[in-house]
Image (spheres, helix red, strand yellow):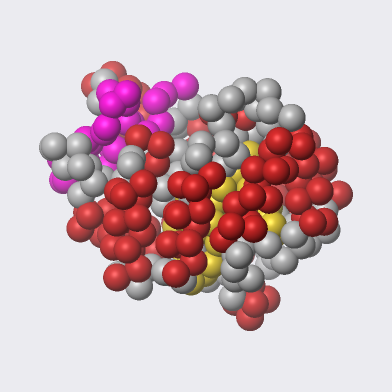
């Protein structure tokens, strides 16, 4: 799967799931189930996985738990261009620790939130935070994908900041996941930073992004619709895939207005006969029967069936 040039350069590209993190009834990471879910994603349409992000409940996990999950994935040979690991924390030393582990385990890139507790940081402050991580890690293999998610973080990563980081660290700051939902911003990013490896944070923008120079998508709902996303990615150059993109967007919109992580976990638990998959760590609460019924009805209307 994927474009030949990305395979040649061993760069991550294509359809990536921001993978869910299965939990036990005691609200610990279910490591065997977590590995199995990432393997299932890779076997059912994903070119790669991005664990330990927003969808993976990363900021409800301890650093030790995250390190153990990265080791479990590495032991299962989920590494290289199949892996972009979430590493961004509020404390620089924690980000450095996770980044070093991801690199040691062979991840092709890391997805890095800015320090997000203090709101309205200056551009200089954000630059200093990223620069400090890069300098402390001190590894030429480091490939950072900046994570822009203003709805969750409370502020945007300005394009001027991204340009400064790319200029200062051109071999290290190589791309971003943009979960802003702002297509005009994504277009500007691609236009102003040629060669920058942009992953829209929603498969809604997969085809439009590819046509403008994006390299794929990293999305929460790809935990459900990866085969349909792959149908767009694998074929977009060779024919008319607009109908496939429209269907993919319909599947994405099935989760609109619903608590995505609880609903996706509940949907997997039911459809895969794996009741433990529904467990979430607070402050998340289980999906309601009404929300699960809503998403099920919407997906049925879209003639969707979860991959076996």
* In magenta segment, residue 258: yes
Front-lying residue, 243 or 208: 208
Q: Is residue 273 above or below residue 289?
A: below
What residue lies at 39% left-to-right and 63% top-to-bottom? 42
Count of numbered labels shown in the rendering: 0
Quarter of the figure that contains the C terminus:
bottom left
19 or 211: nearer the viewer: 19
- Residue 69 vertical position relative to residue 304 in the rendered view, above or below: below
Please state if 80 lies on the left or on the right of 44 as rendered.
right
Picture residue at 51% right of the left edge, 36% below the top: 90
Residue at (59% x, 75% y) in the render: 10
User: In the depicted view, which residue is nearer to us: 298 or 72?
Assistant: 72
The stretch in magenta equals 257-285
Return the x and y of residue 97 as percentages of the image width and height: 45, 54
Q: At which x and y percent is residue 284?
A: 32, 26
Asked where in the image residue 172 lies, by quadrant, the reply is bottom right
Residue 134's quadrant in the figure?
bottom right
The residue at the point 45 percent across, 32 percent down is 254
Q: Please, is residue 297 above or below residue 221 in the view?
A: above
**Magenta highlight on residue 277:** yes
Specify whether residue 77 is in view.
Answer: yes
């Amino acid at each position: 799967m994927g474009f030949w040039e990305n395979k040649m350069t061993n760069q991550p590209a294509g359809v990536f799931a921001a993978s869910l993190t299965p939990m036990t009834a005691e609200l610990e990471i279910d490591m065997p189930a977590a590995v199995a879910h990432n393997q299932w994603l890779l076997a059912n349409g994903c070119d790669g996985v991005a664990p330990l992000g927003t969808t993976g409940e990363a900021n409800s996990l301890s650093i030790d738990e995250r390190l153990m999950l990265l080791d479990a994935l590495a032991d299962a040979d989920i590494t290289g261009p199949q892996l972009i690991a979430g590493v961004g924390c509020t404390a620089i030393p924690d980000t450095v620790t996770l980044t070093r582990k991801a690199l040691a385990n062979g991840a092709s890139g890391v997805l890095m939130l800015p320090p997000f507790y203090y709101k309205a940081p200056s551009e200089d402050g954000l630059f200093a935070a990223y620069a400090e991580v890069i300098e402390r890690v001190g590894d030429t293999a480091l490939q950072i994908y900046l994570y822009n998610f203003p709805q969750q973080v409370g502020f945007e990563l300005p394009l001027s900041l991204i340009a400064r980081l790319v200029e200062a660290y051109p071999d290290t700051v190589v791309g971003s996941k943009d979960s802003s939902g702002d297509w005009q911003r994504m277009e500007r990013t691609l236009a102003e930073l040629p060669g920058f490896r942009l992953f829209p944070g929603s498969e809604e923008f997969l085809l439009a992004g590819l046509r403008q120079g994006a390299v794929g998508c990293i999305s929460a709902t790809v935990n459900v619709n990866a085969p349909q996303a792959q149908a767009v990615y694998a074929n977009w150059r060779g024919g008319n895939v607009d109908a496939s993109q429209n269907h993919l967007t319909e599947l994405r919109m099935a989760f609109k207005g619903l608590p995505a992580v609880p609903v996706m976990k509940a949907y997997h638990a039911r459809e895969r006969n794996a009741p433990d998959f529904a467990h979430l760590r607070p402050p998340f609460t289980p999906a309601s029967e009404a929300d699960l019924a809503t998403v099920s009805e919407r997906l049925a209307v879209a003639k969707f069936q979860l991959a076996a």
